[in-house]
Amino acid sequence: MSRFIVSRDRGHHVRRWEDYETLARAVFEHVNVGVHHDLLRIPYTHLIMEYGMKIPFNKPYMTGNELPYIAQAHANRHLAGNGAFTRRCCDWLEAGIGCHKALLTHSCTAALEMAAMLIDVQPGDEIIMPSYTFVSTANAFVLRGGVPVFVDIRSDTLNIDESKIEAAITSRTKAIVPVHYAGVACEMDAIMDIARRHNLLVIEDAAQGVMSTYKGRPLGSIGHLAAMSFHETKNIISGEGGALLVNAPEYAERAEIILEKGTNRSRFFRGQVDKYTWVDIGSSYLPGELTAAFLLAQMEKAESITARRLAIWEQYHEALESLEVAGKLRRPIVPLNCQHNAHMYYVLLDSLDTRKRVIDGLKQQGINSVFHYVPLHASPAGQKFGRVNGLMKNTEVLSDQLLRLPLWLGVEGEVKKITASLLALL
């Protein structure tokens, strides 16, 4: 084994680690280390995320098997996509979510772009979605010439207001894209009923939805298609990563073709054709095996990760009840028919000015809190490529009021300080 010398900054005491796995685990457990090994120079400041903040907004969590699995992928001599680890990740998704087919992608953005191709979005086709979402929700369809049609969100969950959807439907409407904000489900029964009556497709943006359910059904299993994210800010992570979930079987074969650069390569490897060739549009959407190996280690601990996040969420929720009773803020609302995954804990303050003051005040105490999306309908690209249907009152007001608090495995011991600091600032 290679010997690594690991020391604190400025030459303070030295530790010796006998192998890379032990070193990397130490780094991800946030030991204050710098690394020196032959020509390898990793600056101390690059090893530890957000060390300028005593309490960062996010810290990626390691379960312990990520690095051994990566080493195994290397030993397998298969580093490109669609290897053993990719297949195991897809199997986990299909078994846990119950989708007809799961395809691992290099991002949730890629999965949404694949969905736009699969439903054959043409220039001028309209896609109904909330404005309060990440840009990828809209961009995936704009790339195909689609027109995002923005509708308002509900005041309770901040999800798309299902009662506003029908009024936004025109002869050009192709699909509805509900976004499960904070891992809390949209009102999917109503949305699916609207889609059925108007012959529309539903693509769930379940980027934040892993391990959440709606009336007992996993998010990502309800629409015709769904997209999921494993970005490092999500609950189950691979750095960058995502998945396309196919629930309507008629899209499964073409989804494989699009994933494989427009070729029928998957059928070739199953022995269904004697050679593979270019048969459709597509792109390079697969992640590499190292990413899949990291992700599998996370998936195997998904239940315990979710349970710990829910416990932290409850800590916040209980500690902030008095501030809500006093009218200083509003806590998240989770409908009884939804089981969320504690993707985030946010509060709604009384104004944009208050939020700015609170963010600055927390920052002075070493606590990194953040706001979230700038509504897409108010952005330059949103105004250029999309249109608004109806008033956007909730979107405009709530997006200015929302404040996200640190939520990551290991922050449990800091919740009391964070909530006490928030109380002092309000």
Image: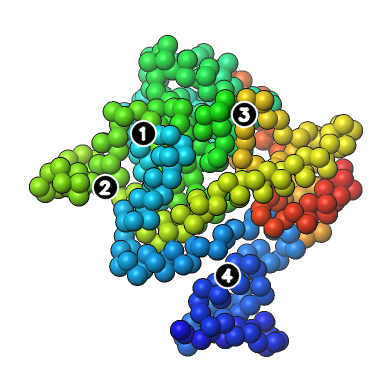
Q: Could you tell me residue 420's position as x and y percent?
A: 86, 50
4 or 1: tag closer to the N-terminus: 4
Q: Amino acid at mark 4?
A: Arg
What is the secondary structure assignment of the residue under circle 4?
A: helix
Residue 260 tag number: 2
Image quarter of the C terminus: top right
Query: Which of the two labelled residues, at mark 3 and mark 2, occupies the earlier sequence position?
Result: 2
Left or right? Give the position of 361 relative to 370.
right
What residue appears at the point 81 percent right and 35 percent down from the top-left corner? 329
Give the percent coordinates (x, y) of residue 406. Answer: 70, 51
Q: Is residue 46 above or below residue 310?
A: below
Say which amino acid is labelled 2: Glu
Q: Crowding near pointer 1: few (<14 within 10 Å), some, many (20+)?
A: some
Q: Position of residue 46 (x, y in %)?
A: 58, 71
Task: Check disc 2: other Cα within 10 Å, few if <14, some if 14-19, many if 20+.
Answer: many
Left or right: where 414 falls relative to 1: right
Q: Disc 3 designates what residue? A: 338
Which residue bears the numbered disc 1?
100
Of the residues shown, which amino acid type is indicated by label 3?
A: Cys
Earlier residue among tags 3 and 1 = 1
> Given the image, on which type of amino acid does mark 1 rest?
His
**CA separation in Å, label 3 and label 1:** 22 Å
Q: CA distance from mark 4 to mark 3?
A: 35 Å
Q: Earlier in the sequence, mark 4 or mark 3?
A: 4
Q: Residue at x 51, y 80 (%)?
A: 19
Residue 313, compared with residue 249, is above or below; it is: below
